[in-house]
Image (cartoon, coloured by chain):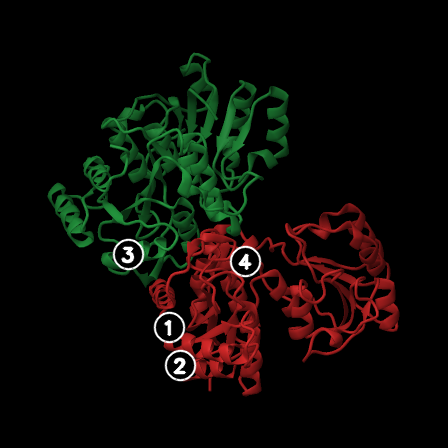
Chain colours: A green, B red
Amino acid sequence: MDHERIAVLAHEKFPDRAKTALGVIRYGDQGVRAVLDRDRAGDRVADHVTDVADAPIVESFADAHAAADGDLDALYIGIAPIGGGFDESWRSDVEAAIEAGCDVVSGLHYFLNEDEELAGLAEEHGVDLVDVRRPGDDLTVASGASAEVDADVVLTVGTDCSVGKMTASLEIVAAARDRGIDAAFVPTGQTGIMIAGWGNPIDRIVSDFTAGAVEEMLVAAGDDHDLLVVEGQGSIVHPAYSAVTCGILHGSMADGLVLCHAADREVVHGYEEFDLPPLGDYVDLYEDLATPVHETEVVAGALNTKDVADEGAAAEAVTEFGDETGVPAADPVRDGADRIVDGIVDAGLGGE
Amino acid sequence: MDHERIAVLAHEKFPDRAKTALGVIRYGDQGVRAVLDRDRAGDRVADHVTDVADAPIVESFADAHAAADGDLDALYIGIAPIGGGFDESWRSDVEAAIEAGCDVVSGLHYFLNEDEELAGLAEEHGVDLVDVRRPGDDLTVASGASAEVDADVVLTVGTDCSVGKMTASLEIVAAARDRGIDAAFVPTGQTGIMIAGWGNPIDRIVSDFTAGAVEEMLVAAGDDHDLLVVEGQGSIVHPAYSAVTCGILHGSMADGLVLCHAADREVVHGYEEFDLPPLGDYVDLYEDLATPVHETEVVAGALNTKDVADEGAAAEAVTEFGDETGVPAADPVRDGADRIVDGIVDAGLGGE
């Protein structure tokens, strides 16, 4: 996937319920030339989101194509309904994109390549349908090769799902690059893969190959950079997703961990009968669990304060989070990730 | 799968390299009427294995069929080459079984159902090809429902792969039943599934569904028994397989853990550059990791002393293992699992 001029489909959900679209706009190397949202057609991205490159919001792929002077190379599906299905109201846009010679990139559970109509049309027009949730066929068990990569490896680990591990990872990479560190993002989920343009969707891998699929990415990227920041998933004490978390922890053989948390989160998201343990327990658990495979420690913390309205209260929450975890901490969105990179560099990582 | 009269294929590998065949003979409810091993044809099972029901060892399926007076309902593939492929030298036996109206049960990576010749023949003769490594299509993420099952749940957890977790689990069930406890075995691997006749192959599940696939089994079996013994996999600090271990730990929401270890094992099997941590660390790690999801503790230990030649040294190793872990311990094969069941019952589990 190497797209330079793309349109992003986000019908009826931009920006607040369009996590993938926003991620690609904010962090992707692709140039976003238009956003499709029939509810906001006529607005501009800048009317809704600050600090990102602006683009028109349009009604349809035809309008996006026109707005980009007919010069687009892909349509990205930037939203996902609950369950990951394909919304039939998108079909005309996807067909129009294919007919215009564009690839279509999707992180849906529903694989575009298994839709006979779309697959046939794509073949006819010589374009690719890229289902980023479909794992490669060549994955296997880990061998321990992550220990051999040249780059230092940092992994974002969470107290829960949906605390901002992907965003923290991307902000760390950006802040490290600002400091002259040759850093790269290693994606493990569909949004991260769409942003980065490569990667293995770890939650879709055969469970035996979970660590191996992380190792495969690190081996592929490890000699080209000084710092790899691996996007973590879930939490090591999540009642449903801890297997994925554990596989990434051991497969990455991380040299340092960044603990990610959402302010005021006290119970597991969507599993409210499960309390989150104290923050210090997470530090101990992640370190104790990782170390027999590869010695590591929590070197910094990322606190997501998006639900804290008041700037002062957010700053206070970050200070408290840093005190409880005993490492440099920041809200990477509010504050940038510079303090987090301090923690990484202080631990001797990143090749400085 | 509900087979009562079966033949087990173990060509050139019975008994020492035929783990599945031996497991089915020793622990399965199916009656094994013959073992196929062309290298030992003419011998009897009792010539090689003690304490199990005897059966003839024969050259081919035709001979097995004759030895069972034409009354067989399945052929089980009781061996697996490295890589899990199908050995073409078995094809004539499998075909003969299908033509005789027998189901064929396999735990190979190679799916019999995807072999057009065998699948066509099976359809023609109205028999089932059962690929136990192929997960069901209806699995999903865990919901936390394992907490609701009536039965107490015990999980065998390991210091490494291949330390005898399946055997320990089966011996615990046998010893508990001897004591009048209504206990059942919950399989998680292909051999366990072939023995039990049901189950989800957890190492082949999509990683996001690892815990959910365990939960699905516990919910299915939990109201029919007082004690469920879940077969663990791998080790929580295994460089390749810990994701599977962690998913089973949290998905089972076990009330008690039995720590399984192999005497004199000091490094990870097949990953010799990784040392095993001290036994006490395993106890802490498993308990600390499990407890935020469901409070539990290590209640007993199982030590595999098969590589300890001397009876006295084995007994000493078991004593030492019990001292180090602080719980009742036994080698379930040498000693039976009675002391292990003591630990389970002392912890208030099993409904006694």
Disc 1 residue type? Answer: Glu
Quadrant of the image containing the C terminus of chain A: top left
Q: Are circles 2 and 4 on residues that touch, CB within 8 Å? A: no
Residue located beneath label 2 in the image: B347
Figure disc tally: 4
Say which chain tag 4 marks: B
Say few, some or many: other residues with alpha carbon within 10 Å of mark 1 (under 14 / 14 to 19 / 20 or more).
many
Q: Residue at x 40, y 59 (%)?
A: A239
- Element type where label 4 sits in the image: helix
- Rounded to the nearest angstrom, the CA distance separating label 1 from label 3 is 19 Å
Q: Are circles 1 and 2 on residues that touch, CB within 8 Å? A: yes
- Element type where label 1 sits in the image: loop
Q: Which quadrant of the view contains residue A49?
A: top left
Q: Are circles 3 and 4 on residues that touch, CB within 8 Å? A: no
Q: Residue at x 36, y 41 (%)?
A: A231
Disc 3 residue type? Answer: Tyr
Residue located beneath label 4 in the image: B202
- Rounded to the nearest angstrom, the CA distance separating label 2 from label 3 is 27 Å
Disc 4 residue type? Answer: Ile
Q: Nearer the viewer, residue A252 or A274?
A: A252
- Element type where label 3 sits in the image: helix
Say few, some or many: other residues with alpha carbon within 10 Å of mark 3 (under 14 / 14 to 19 / 20 or more).
many
Image disc number at residue A282: 3
Q: Is residue B116 left or right of residue B85?
A: right
